[in-house]
Amino acid sequence: ESVEERERAREMRRTSVTDLPPITAVGVWFPEDTKRLPPEWTPIEKTSSGRFVADLNAGSSKKVSIFKPRRTKKIMLCIKRETGKPPITGLGIVFVDTDVDGRLGESPLPGYVKVQDGIGSVNANLNKLTLGRDIKLVYSHTEGSAPIDDIKIIFKDAGE
């Protein structure tokens, strides 16, 4: 595939995305915990290159203790597109709890809301499968700001 073909394909995807309703919600889905994704949610299944599953837990440590290795579970980012609802205008990540060195957790910026529960009512902590700090996805619906019309997952270490 040539650079021109990739650019053309990227542009076609971009054009088709702008024709869709806006992204109005983001969610965290743990497929092993909640087998069926409600139909209004769309998982981001592949990374930006299309080469990898867009598992937010990919590359995390598979060993959570020195005694018992543990298989990691997939964590998928999902979006909801709806007409007539305010679009998502900002996304972020916050460390919400105090770390082992006593550094206080972060609060979302003004106007941002934490995704507390995952799709299927499980804890939406992006770091819940390790012994690390709680990490939450945050979003905003700021009026007058440009809507986010597409979300891509990029694995930088994989050359994306």
Image (spheres, rainbow, N blue to C red):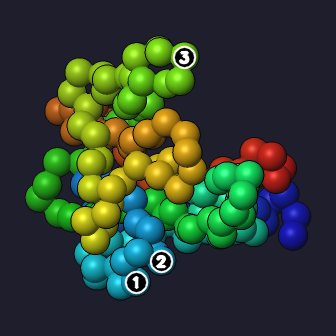
Q: Is residue 150 above or below residue 92?
A: below
Label 2: which secondary element: loop
Label 2 to label 1: alpha-carbon separation? 6 Å
Q: Position of residue 116 (x, y in %)?
A: 27, 48
Label 3 to label 2: alpha-carbon separation? 32 Å
How busy is the neighbourhood of tag 2: few (under 14 within 10 Å), some, or many (20 plus)? few
Instruction: Residue under label 2, please give it.
Output: 32
Q: Amino acid at mark 3?
A: Asp
Among numbered discs 3 and 2, the one appearing first in the sequence: 2
Name the disc covering residue 23, or none: none
Label 1 to label 3: alpha-carbon separation? 37 Å
Among numbered discs 1 and 3, the one appearing first in the sequence: 1
Q: Position of residue 113 (x, y in %)?
A: 24, 37
Instruction: Residue under label 1, please give it.
Output: 35
Residue 49 visible? The answer is yes
Q: Position of residue 75 (x, y in %)?
A: 51, 62
Q: Quadrant of the N terminus?
A: bottom right
Q: Amino acid at mark 1?
A: Lys
Name the disc covering residue 101, or none: 3
Where residue 37 sits, quadrant-wise, is bottom left
Instruction: Please state if 10 lies on the left or on the right of 66 as rendered.
Output: left
Query: Residue at the right extreme?
Result: 2
Q: Is residue 7 above or below residue 109?
A: below
